[in-house]
Image (cartoon, grey):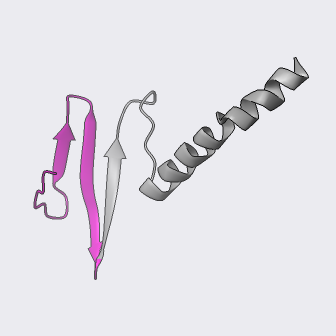
Amino acid sequence: MLALTRKKGESIMVNNNIEISILELRGDQVKIGITAPKEIPVYRKEVYLQIQKENEASSSPKSLEVLKGIL
């Protein structure tokens, strides 16, 4: 993991097309802005993990058996 220190108004570039900006600091919270191409999905980690969990559940052997039964 790379840890960087940034101040309000400063940014971090990832590759050539993703910019992460520090928008606001309030107590122990940091508001960030992410500028990325539309084809690159950006999720909060808890949402990403839920999507992964649902994808795994839908591709389980039991789900495949249900699909075979439909066909």
Q: Quadrant where the C terminus lies?
A: top right
Q: Would you place residue 62 above or below residue 24 in this image?
A: above
Is 71 situated left or right of 30 in this image?
A: right
| Quarter of image, res 25 | bottom left
Magenta stretch?
1-28
Label total for image: 0
Q: What residue lies at 89% left-to-right and 23% top-to-bottom?
A: 70
| Quarter of image, res 28 | bottom left
Q: Residue furthest bottom?
A: 27
Q: What residue lies at 28% left-to-right and 36% top-to-bottom?
A: 18
Is 43 situated left or right of 60 in this image?
A: left
Residue 54 image point, x, y percent: 62, 45
Q: Would you place residue 3 above or below residue 39 in this image?
A: below
Residue 15 magenta-highlighted: yes
Is 22 situated left or right of 1 in this image?
A: right
Camera-nearest residue between 45 and 9: 45
| Quarter of image, res 55 | top right
Q: Would you place residue 63 above or below residue 32 in this image?
A: above
Q: What residue lies at 45% left-to-right and 30% top-to-bottom?
A: 38
Q: Would you place residue 55 above or below residue 30 in this image?
A: above
Residue 41 image point, x, y percent: 45, 37
Residue 25 magenta-highlighted: yes
Residue 67 image point, x, y percent: 81, 26
Q: Residue furthest top?
A: 71
Q: What residue lies at 11% left-to-right and 57% top-to-bottom?
A: 4
Camera-nearest residue between 65 and 12: 65
